[in-house]
Image (cartoon, rainbow, N blue to C red):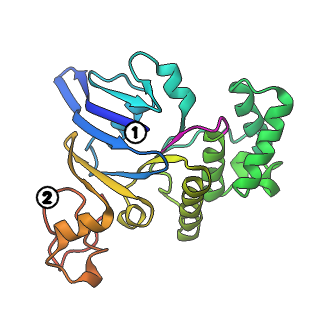
Amino acid sequence: MPVISAAGLARTFQTRRGPVEAVRSVDLTVQKGEILGFLGPNGAGKTTTLRMLTTLLAPTGGAATVAGHDLATDPAGVRRASGYVAQSGGVDPQITVREELVTQGRLYRLPKARAVERAAELAHDLGLTELLDRKAGALSGGQRRRLDIAMALTHRPAVLFLDEPTTGLDPGSRADLWDLVRRLRDEQSTTVFLTTHYLDEADALADRLVIVDRGTVVAEGTPSALKLRHCGSIDASLQDTFLAVTGRGPVPADAAPVAV
């Protein structure tokens, strides 16, 4: 059974100007231990889809399950099985890394002693041990992102949802985060659902890509398969640059790289 399965997932917002179909119909499956890259231009429905899959937004159509739990009938089960890192993060700048991690453990009903142990484990795994007594507001962007992920992993979720996790990070911090995501897959078989605007990130990290546009899936496959399909006429040395992520066909050879 896939860890994530969605069929006809949809969300329509009611506005004063009428209904807006943010997500029209998304069908997808994600297997255990897979890193799925979820791509598309601004307004394509990426974050809305992710928020539905994490029970933060109720679908207006379709159905989905996460780790065997139905969004509609067992949202608590979905939350227990999921870790979520939002674009904006969620740390309190006024408290220490240790306090953040212990508090997160207590929110998941871990006994105090176990929450302290779990905080130390996560700090070790994510390279935060030397920062445990530093206030979160004093961390660098990359360090804060690692703390966000540590908090999302407190309850050992089967699925980790990452919404544009490297936006604004320097190249070194991005590379460190890529290594962390790979380790989660390779060492813990964590399933990762990743939205990103960076083509190099999707190509480097994702086992498979799902590309959405105007609220529906327009292409899916491995990065190499999609490059061959949409950029077959381009010299192989340039295919990484010209990965066609909108499903609209090959990119002209003289076009500048575009982040979508």
Task: Report the Cα–Cα distance between label 1 and label 2.
Answer: 28 Å
Report the predominant secondary structure element of the magenta stretch.
loop
Mark number for residue 2? 1
Of labels 1 and 2, earlier in sequence is 1
Asked whether 177 falls inside the magenta stretch, the response is no
Query: Which residue is more in the foreground, 220 or 147?
Result: 220
**As drawn, 187 above or below 252:** above
Local secondary structure at mark 1:
loop
Does the rendering let one see residue 55? no
Does the rendering let one see residue 58? yes
Q: Which of the image's four quarters has the C terminus?
A: bottom left
Circle 1 Cα neighbour tier, 10 Å, few/some/many (<14 / 14–19 / ≥20): some
Query: Which residue is more in the foreground, 5 or 105?
Result: 5
Farthest residue to the top: give it. 73
Name the amino acid type tagged 2: Arg
Which segment is the magenta one? 154-161
Front label number (1 vs 2): 1
**As drawn, 192 above or below 248:** above
Circle 2 Cα neighbour tier, 10 Å, few/some/many (<14 / 14–19 / ≥20): few
Residue 248 lies left or right of residue 98; in this view the side is left
Mark number for residue 248? 2
Q: Residue at x 49, y 46 (%)?
A: 191
Q: Residue at x 26, y 76 (%)?
A: 239
Name the amino acid type tagged 1: Pro
Q: Residue at x 56, y 43 (%)?
A: 89
Local secondary structure at mark 2:
loop
